[in-house]
Amino acid sequence: MTESWGERTTATRAVQRIVRSFVEWGVLVETGDRGTYAPAAKIPVAGVGPWLLEAGLVSSGRREYPFRALAAGAAFYPFDMALSGQNVSGNPRLEICRQGLDEDVVMLNR
């Protein structure tokens, strides 16, 4: 199956609109080169980090997940949650468990 010129042009315009929306939302920033973009600075969030982790666990369909991988995952870009196990331990629906020497796992309490 081959694409026609019109289909490619429509797809290109759609991508341009999406990227432009990301720039307007502050997720991407324009660089000096035309058509080249860079990630914007992360947005610090306070107080909702444990809730976002819980939402990440629920959306992943998993009951547990490595803490650092979840907190720093692409799903939470562009937010900088700056979380630790202590921040999460105050959430009654989440539990932090140590696995190995240096790995924390966040779990849903059910």
Image (tube, grey):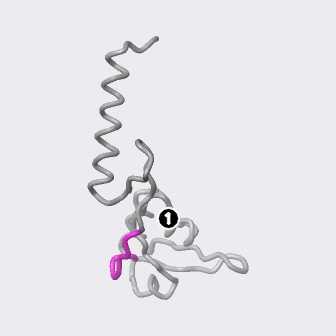
Number of numbered callouts drawn: 1
Left or right: residue 102 compared with residue 57: right
Please tell me which residue lies in front, 32 or 81.
32
Which quadrant would the C terminus be assigned to in this image?
Answer: bottom left
Which residue is most to the front? 32
Point 49% across, 79% down: residue: 95
Residue 45 lies in the magenta stretch:
yes
**What residue sits 32% from the left and 60% below the top?**
26
Query: Which residue is outermost to the right?
Result: 101
| Above/below status of 84 relative to 109 | below
Of 26 and 54, the residue lying toward us:
26
2 lies above or below 62: above
Please indicate whether residue 106 sits to the left or right of residue 104 in the image: left
52 within the magenta span: no
Q: Which residues are magenta?
A: 42-49
Quadrant housing residue 51 = bottom left
How many other residues sit within 10 Å of disc 1, few (<14), some (14-19) or many (≥20)? some
| Image quadrant where residue 18 sits | top left
In terms of secondary structure, where does tag 1 sit? Answer: loop
Amino acid carrying label 1: it is Arg
Q: Position of residue 94 (x, y in %)?
A: 44, 77
Q: Residue at x 44, y 75 (%)?
A: 109
At x 38%, y 53%, the residue is 30
Which quarter of the figure has residue 2?
top left
Whether 53 is drawn above or below 84: the answer is above
Residue receiving disc 1 = 63
Q: Position of residue 32 (x, y in %)?
A: 43, 51
**Dominant secondary-structure state across the stretch colored magenta:** loop
Residue 62 horizontal/vertical position (percent):
50, 60
Residue placed most toward the observer, 39 or 75: 39
Question: Residue 101's spot in the image, x, y percent?
Answer: 72, 80
